[in-house]
Image: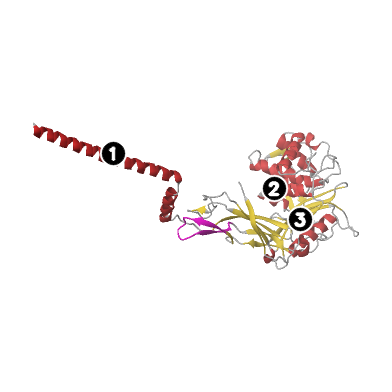
Amino acid sequence: MKRIAILLSLVLALSLAPPTAEATVPEAPEILAQYALIAETTSGRILFAQNEHERAYPASLTKIMTVLLALEAVEDGQIGMDDVVTVTASALEGLHPQGSSIQLRPGDQITVRDLCYAAMVASGNDACNVLGEYLSGNLEAFIDRMNERAAELGCENTRFANACGLDLPDQYTTAYDMYLITMAARKILEFTRIAYTVSYRIEAIEGHPNSVSRDLVTTNHLISQMRTRDYYYSNAKGIKTGHTTQAGYCLVSMAGKNNLETICVVMNSAEDENGRIGSFTDSEKLHEWVFNNFEYRTIVEKGRPMESLPVVMGKDADSVKLVTKEKLDSTVPRRFDPEALTLQIQLFDDVGNRNEEGALIAPVERDDLVFGEIRVSYGDIDYGAIELVADLRIELDAQEQLGNTVKSILGNPWVLRVAALLAAVAVLYVLSAIVHNARRKRAKRTNYRGKRRR
């Protein structure tokens, strides 16, 4: 589609220089994590990021992907949450004896539901391996599926080499990729239910003598005071912790306040000088920074007039207003000034029925065609684009159409030539008829006189 990039940039600012993000938002707090990201979930806007595309060990953040695949398999009908799984020796092979687990043994029986809770709440490495083997037949095939799913989600710097998060040289991800994985997982209601759980009871399964029972307590101290009250954060909702010597302290968390919901990823954090775990303190700082400095609001209203286009053969109208098709909502700084928005308009010159001058030819339908778009920005922040449509229906003026049709016909040189030719033929025909009739009359008179002489 050929487009005319217009036209105008409406800079609705009082000053010549538009505001910058740095000028309208206080600087983010200092954190211990080497890699971090925080975003608002409704708009998906990333509000702070630090080394978010650099590779890092994920530790038990890996379990988010493992449970995501399990729950997607449930949604697809491949397995059921109440399926009873028998633990095999091969699923437990190679697990570090000091790693987190719920102490599963070969022959134990446990449901898929309980395995998902064990993985997310208690961070059970054994539960993850049992899940993976049950889903794909063996762990190698499951790990392949983990990497396929990561690629499908747009993760460009992620590779999994196990299902639970133990450090391996070829097991890595990024803060940004973990954000993508978690945003996909949170779309599944059961995932959020599991990820927000503080404590959970695995009950023995009736009729299965080898089934296990366990009491699980979350490893996420932001949402629980059961193990320590040092990190409890009342606005937090979940989701998953991770820690190994090489990975440092990792955490994906969600929080909500002031009609905002945020997702935060911190990786390779450390303990501060007081021995406090940085993954928890970093996350709370970043969540609170967003809640104190941002809000979610409408920045461009639906139906806002932006431009007009000329219309020909329209009934009672010679132009149509172009308005925003939808409103634009986003997360903006609290000190956001709507008068300082920059609106760049782009009109599409080949949309709709047009005459040679580019004017629209009636009828024009409301909301039927997209005649352009506006791109909205605020300082150096791009908030995206909104489509422009006609604000009302303009009917065809039949009388004007008839007049224009006649003018068009009469104004066509070929039509004039054909008309002149037809006129000439008609004149010749008439003259020929007159001559022919005159000859017939003379012939009749001559015949009459001849008869009288006789």
Q: CA distance from mark 1 to mark 3?
A: 95 Å
Which residue in the protein does label 1 denote? 432
Which residue in the protein does label 2 denote? 184
The three-letter amino acid code for the residue at tag 1 is Ser
The three-letter amino acid code for the residue at tag 2 is Ala
Q: Which mark is residue 38?
A: 3
Left or right: where 405 falls relative to 283: left
Work out which quarter of the rendered image holds the C terminus and state it.
Answer: top left
Q: Residue furthest front?
A: 453
Q: Nearer the viewer, residue 375 or 178?
A: 375
The secondary structure type at the circle numbered 1 is helix
Residue at image point 69% right, 50% down? 186
Instruction: Classify residue 295 by image quadrant.
Output: bottom right
Q: Residues within 10 Å of mark 3 (few under 14, many from 20)?
A: many
Image coordinates for residue 25, horizontal then vertical, percent: 77, 63
Q: CA distance from mark 2 to mark 1?
A: 89 Å
Q: Residue furthest bottom?
A: 14
The three-letter amino acid code for the residue at tag 3 is Ile
Image coordinates for residue 158, horizontal then vertical, percent: 78, 43
The secondary structure type at the circle numbered 3 is strand
Q: Are marks 1 and 3 in contact (CB under 8 Å)?
A: no
The secondary structure type at the circle numbered 2 is helix
Q: Residues within 10 Å of mark 2 (few under 14, many from 20)?
A: some
Residue at image point 71% right, 65% down? 336
Q: Nearer the viewer, residue 261 or 88?
A: 261
Q: Is residue 118 magenta?
A: no
Which residues lie in the magenta part?
A: 308-325
Considering the whole magenta stretch, tell me its main secondary structure: strand
